[in-house]
Image (cartoon, helix red, strand yellow):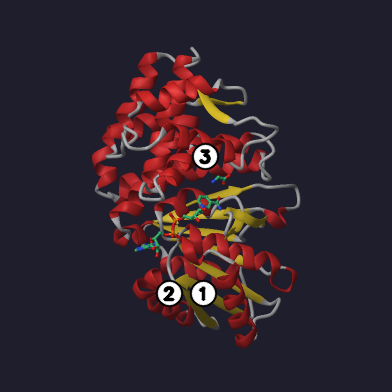
């Protein structure tokens, strides 16, 4: 099992360890029972993850003598809302959960974001542990303490920053992850290589087949690298005042394409297209050289992610979604661009015509 600490401030109370490994549930339980004592634990998961793993996880808690309850909700983004929060909170009250209770988020980003949100407000705040089961959650959403639920007008509009007290990423969970969900995580992993680490980029392109086959040895190296990048960024900029925005590479246009597709394009596919667009804009504006652009396009195609925006998507619709992007500030759409692989920067003044041309060229 590998381990790294997220050092958030001098008071070590908000710092925590990320532990990563393959089949680490037994060790995880020993660590929880020794280091994260609580009167009661409540495992919160969605019904898909629950149907595969809840019994095994509940038994593991009981085997080390811990008092555990379980709450499940329907899987999917459509559950990430205030109604589900109220439902879960009602069940916590029925169980008798109090400030001596520890929540356990077992699942993907939807479970993690929502459990983190509840933990941050239930009885003015109780601790929680992240056990991420999707690739996205293992390399991104379980780390850094962004919690949120969606509102009818947009995603993640109600939320808090609330760090977990530990993260346990067991690669074993990835074995049952549907292909589409695995590909969403693949796009995020490529993103880390592009924004932070030429070595990770090379490791990925040289081992793409093993990654796609979910080889646990290769995945361990890759997930560990990604977690290290994410934790280093969060350590410097916990509340997203600057550096953390770099994690949005590919997401600005990606979200717009996802929305215009009415979510028939997955998050990973949107991010893949958004990363190519951001790299092409960078090249057009003479920040990035053509060879690097080609390497970025190649790795995305190698991963089996798309390189072309469907012909029938209107460029005008994508442009107007961009303007609605919540990251827009003072009439500026902030784009993360590249000077080279591993060297991103935020640009707030890109001419609409350049974005428009790149979208057209990508069809
Ligand atoms: P998700 O949580 O909806 O999981 C995707 C699907 O996979 C679900 O149906 C789930 O039941 C299923 N699943 C999860 N683990 C499984 C496993 N091991 N085996 C079989 N099925 C499994 O989606 P996600 O992609 O993990 O997360 C997306 C969410 O995360 C979004 O709401 C997004 O806003 C949020 N997010 C948050 C952050 C953050 O920093 N907090 C970062 C990225 C994304
Ligand atoms: N997923 C982006 C962030 O954590 O800031």
Q: Name the residue tied to disc 2.
A: 57
- In the picture, the disc for residue 90 is none
As drawn, is 244 to the left or to the right of 194? right
- For image coordinates 39% across by 69% down, the residue present is 49
Residue under label 3: 321
Q: Quadrant of the C terminus?
A: top left
| Rendered position, 186 above or below 276 | below
Residue 331: x and y in percent read 66, 31
Whole-angstrom CA distance, mark 2 to mark 1, is: 9 Å
Expressed as whole percent of the image width and height from the top left, the position of residue 353 reads 50, 20
Q: Nearer the viewer, residue 346 or 99?
A: 346
Q: Earlier in the sequence, mark 2 or mark 1?
A: 1
Asked if the residues shown at circle 1 and circle 3 are in contact, with their CB atoms under 8 angstroms apart, the answer is no
* Disc 1 crowd, CA 10 A, few/some/many (<14, 14-19, 20+): many
- Kindly tell me whether residue 1 is visible in this rendering: no
Q: CA distance from mark 3 to mark 2?
A: 42 Å
Q: Is residue 214 above or below residue 310?
A: below
Q: Please report the residue visible at 65 percent of the width from the left and 57 percent of the height from the top.
A: 159
Q: Which secondary structure, mark 2?
A: helix
Secondary-structure class at tag 1: strand
Residue underneath mark 1: 43
Report if the CB atoms under discs 2 and 1 are less than 8 Å apart: yes
Q: Is residue 92 left or right of residue 343?
A: right
- What is the count of numbered marks? 3
| Label 3 close to label 2 by CB (< 8 Å) | no
Where's ligand 1: which quadrant?
A: bottom left
Image quarter hosting the N terminus: bottom left
Q: Which is more toward the observer, 268 or 311?
A: 311
Q: Is residue 86 visible?
A: yes
Q: CA distance from mark 1 to mark 3?
A: 37 Å
Circle 3 SS class: helix
């Amino acid at each position: 099992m590998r381990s790294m600490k997220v050092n958030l401030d001098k008071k070590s109370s908000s710092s925590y360890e990320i532990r990563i490994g393959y089949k680490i549930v037994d060790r995880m339980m020993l660590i929880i029972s020794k280091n994260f004592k609580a009167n009661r634990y409540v495992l919160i998961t969605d019904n898909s993850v629950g149907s595969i793993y809840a019994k095994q996880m509940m038994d593991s808690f009981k085997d080390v003598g811990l008092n555990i309850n379980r709450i499940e909700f329907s899987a999917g983004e459509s559950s990430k809302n205030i109604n589900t929060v109220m439902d879960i909170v009602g069940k916590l009250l029925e169980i008798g959960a109090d400030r001596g209770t520890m929540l356990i988020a077992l699942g993907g980003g939807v479970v993690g974001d929502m459990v983190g949100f509840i933990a941050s407000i239930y009885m003015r705040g109780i601790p929680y542990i992240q056990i991420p089961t999707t690739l996205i959650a293992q390399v991104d959403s379980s780390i850094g303490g962004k919690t949120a639920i969606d509102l009818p007008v947009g995603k993640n509009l109600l939320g808090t920053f609330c760090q977990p007290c530990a993260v346990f990423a067991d690669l074993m969970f990835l074995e049952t992850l549907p292909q589409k969900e695995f590909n969403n995580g693949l796009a995020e992993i490529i993103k880390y290589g592009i924004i932070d680490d030429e070595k990770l980029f090379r490791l990925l392109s040289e081992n793409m087949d093993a990654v796609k086959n979910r080889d646990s040895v290769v995945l361990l190296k890759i997930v560990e690298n990604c977690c290290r990048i994410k934790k280093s960024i969060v350590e410097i900029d916990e509340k997203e005042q600057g550096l953390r925005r770099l994690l949005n590479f590919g997401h600005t246009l990606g979200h717009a394409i996802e929305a215009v597709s009415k979510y028939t394009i997955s998050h990973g596919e949107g991010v893949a297209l958004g990363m190519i667009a951001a790299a092409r804009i960078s090249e057009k504006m003479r920040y990035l050289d053509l060879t690097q652009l080609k390497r970025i396009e190649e790795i995305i195609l190698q991963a089996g992610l798309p390189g072309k925006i469907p012909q029938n998507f209107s460029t005008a619709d994508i442009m107007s979604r961009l303007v609605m992007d919540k990251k827009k500030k003072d009439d500026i759409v902030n784009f993360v661009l590249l000077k080279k692989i591993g060297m991103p920067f935020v640009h707030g003044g890109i001419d609409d015509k350049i974005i428009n041309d790149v979208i057209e060229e990508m069809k």
